[in-house]
């Protein structure tokens, strides 16, 4: 049994496909299949069920997968500890992020980190909050870049993300700098799936039942629907695209924020690589709130 076999097996589990696993790690489907078969042969158990729709874990496979992840985490810790001793010349950081945050926040963070530590490999996973939370639980990733929703893991706050109201450019409220929830309560509303918890909480706090017509994940699609007059929406600043044709942005009244930050499994052990990433991220986000405020405030303030 080799670490290579274990890593190939985990990739098959993550992708639920021999073909996709091979594509991601640069092996043929046959080579992936052989590595998994060799692992099963050495352990003398069946780990994976193979069927037309893909693969699934056997009951013993589910139990062993957790142990394999723990073993590979130890491998990563060894590498990262060595990297700390040698000045972080090597190592790996695995980051999970909510998709809406990735576009604006992560490129700058990763760029800053790579400039400082070019030898450290950065692996990025994108998903929704539940997926990122599960990746942390299963140790698939070292750190998640998320909104603060639960306190299951350690949360390191970075910045506050202001919620912004979007309406079509010809909407009666389009010239207002601030829009109260009650003013759009009865109008068609497009609910962003990634913000549904915080938005439902906001509506409930104000005793409002939103007229939700659609629940949509993709931000570009949501903005396009607002452009066409399908409905209004509320989005965090971090998710707002650079250009906003045929829609107008207004502050939500009263103003509401959601906290963005880093989520890690535990502070009991933080590797040198993860420590460096946290430090770089905190430095990068120090003045990001001000930059975001200036970029949108200058546009919204003109309405007054």
Image (spheres, grey):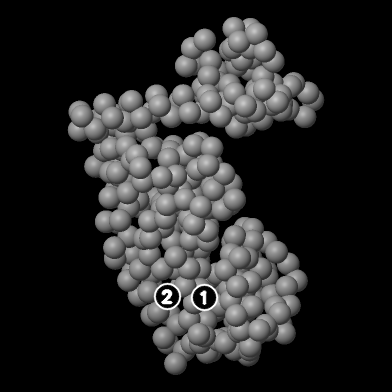
Residue located beneath label 1 in the image: 164
- Residue 157 visible in image: yes
* Picture layout, residue 121 above or below residue 198: above
Q: Residue at x 52, y 89 (%)?
A: 176
- Mark 2 closeness class: few <14, some 14–19, many ≥20 residues within 10 Å: some
Quadrant including the C terminus: bottom left
Position of 232 compared to 143: left or right? right
Residue 140: x and y in percent read: 50, 36
Q: Which mark is residue 296?
A: 2
Q: How many residues crowd mark 1 within 10 Å: few (<14), some (14–19), many (20+)? A: many
Q: Are marks 1 and 2 in contact (CB under 8 Å)?
A: yes
Q: In this rendering, is residue 209 above or below 61? A: below
The residue nearer to you, when weighing 37 against 244, is: 37
The image shows residue 272 at horizontal and vertical percentages of 28, 37
Q: Earlier in the sequence, mark 1 or mark 2?
A: 1
| Residue 12 location (% of width, % of height) | 61, 25
Q: CA distance from mark 1 to mark 2?
A: 10 Å
Secondary structure beneath disc 2? Answer: helix
């Amino acid at each position: 049994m080799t670490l290579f076999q274990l890593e190939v097996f985990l990739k098959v589990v993550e992708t639920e496909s021999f073909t996709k696993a091979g594509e991601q790690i640069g092996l043929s489907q046959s080579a992936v299949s052989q590595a998994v078969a060799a692992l099963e042969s050495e352990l003398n158990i069946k780990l994976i069920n193979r069927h037309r729709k893909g693969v699934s874990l056997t009951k013993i496979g589910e139990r062993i997968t957790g142990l394999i992840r723990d073993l590979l985490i130890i491998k990563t810790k060894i590498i990262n500890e060595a990297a700390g001793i040698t000045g972080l010349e090597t190592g790996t950081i695995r980051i999970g992020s909510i998709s809406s945050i990735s576009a604006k926040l992560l490129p700058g963070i990763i760029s800053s980190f790579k400039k400082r530590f070019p030898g450290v490999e950065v692996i990025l996973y994108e998903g929704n909050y539940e997926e990122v939370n599960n990746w942390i639980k299963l140790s698939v990733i070292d750190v998640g870049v998320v909104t603060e929703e639960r306190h299951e893991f350690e949360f390191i706050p970075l910045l506050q993300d202001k919620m912004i109201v979007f309406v079509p450019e010809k909407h009666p409220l389009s010239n207002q700098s601030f829009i109260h929830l009650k003013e759009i309560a009865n109008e068609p509303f497009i609910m962003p799936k990634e913000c549904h918890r915080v938005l439902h909480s906001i509506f409930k706090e104000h005793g409002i039942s939103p007229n939700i017509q659609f629940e949509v994940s993709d931000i570009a699609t949501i903005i396009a629907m607002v452009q066409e007059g399908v409905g209004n929406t509320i989005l965090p600043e971090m998710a707002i695209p650079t250009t906003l044709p045929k829609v107008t942005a207004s502050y939500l009244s009263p103003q509401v924020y959601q906290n963005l930050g880093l989520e890690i499994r535990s502070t009991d052990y933080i590797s040198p690589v993860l420590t460096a990433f946290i430090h770089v991220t905190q430095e990068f986000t120090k003045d990001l709130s001000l930059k975001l405020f200036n970029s949108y405030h200058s546009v919204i303030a003109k309405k007054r």
